[in-house]
Image (tube, rainbow, N blue to C red):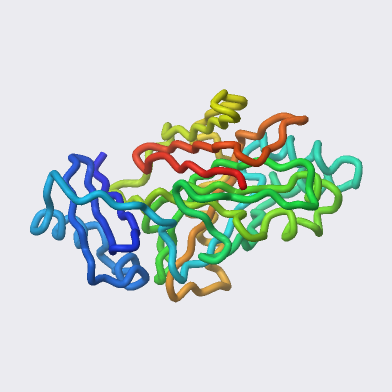
Amino acid sequence: MNYIQIFLSESGIHLRDQSGQQANLSNQNWDDFINQPDLYPTCQSLIQSHGSAEAAPFKALAPIDHQEIWAAGVTYLRSKVARMEESKESGGDTFYDKVYSAERPEIFYKGNKLRSVGPGGKVRIRKDSHWNVPEPELTLFINSAGLLAGYSIGNDMSSRDIEGENPLYLPQAKVYDGAAGLGPCLLITEKPLDPSTEIAIWIKRGGQQVFEGNTQISQMKRGHQELVDYLTMELSFPAGAYLMTGTCIVPDPPFTLQSGDHIFIQIEPIGILENIVQ
């Protein structure tokens, strides 16, 4: 598959294609650049005219400036089951059962640049929560024209005990400082990602692996365009938006994240998003 990775760093924008050719752009505005109507051919042309197999090293930041981050929930069967289990005592389990089969998906606001964390950055767990998990999610980039224009990796940090106590507590369980891992790049492709694309996660604690899981995006009940259509139905995004698409890789209780844990989420050819729990 032909693709181009678009990285954001303190020194500018960096492009890299599937063959390893790279181009560095130091005078481009992130918001303007990624919202170009012909982004893929533009990047392809820039690599062809300015590209090199070798480029100066750079530290990738979260690929976000004025984009909003949203998220969809209960898009996989395993997610529905997990959310029903955590909210059974509060009586909220029926809500998750219904939304899985409903025409309208669950979509909620996740954050922005201020709340997000890039590659190698520190995600957080709430101090008023005792059951916290990462949620590895394929993340869609929707440009300012409302079109699905690329992909990234999202880490939807979640406080499951707060969410399970009452469905109305979802914003507190999902939205707080350091709750949205994003990166390592924005991937643009000539064709949509193959349904067999795998999402993998592993967590290390003290150098030892304490959790791992994987799935394919084909296991998602809802289509990508369906989620994009609902998000953009009554919302405009002048700088574009990211939409996390849900997960079915849910660590079973009593697993909970601890400070110092390393979270690795891999979706090729986007790459690996590594975050450290603060």
Q: How many marks?
A: 0
Q: Is residue 188 visible?
A: yes
Quadrant that contains the N terminus: top left
**Residue at position x 65%, y 41% in the image:** 259
Q: Quadrant location of residue 115?
A: bottom right
Residue 133: x percent and y percent?
Answer: 67, 40
Residue 68: x percent and y percent?
Answer: 52, 66
User: 38 or 251, which is in the foreground?
Assistant: 251
**Is the residue 159 above or below the residue 200 in the image?**
below
Q: Quadrant location of residue 20?
A: top left
Is residue 43 toward the left or the right of residue 230 in the image?
A: left
Q: Quadrant location of residue 44?
A: bottom left
Q: Residue furthest left?
A: 49
Is residue 153 toward the left or the right of residue 155 in the image?
A: left
Q: Is residue 224 visible?
A: no
**Is the residue 74 above or below the residue 170 in the image?**
above
Residue 21: x percent and y percent?
Answer: 16, 46
**Residue at position x 59%, y 41% in the image:** 247
Is residue 228 toward the left or the right of residue 277 in the image?
A: left
User: 216 or 259, which is in the foreground?
Assistant: 259
Residue 5: x percent and y percent?
Answer: 30, 50
**Residue at position x 20%, y 58% in the image:** 24
Is residue 190 toward the left or the right of residue 143 in the image?
A: left
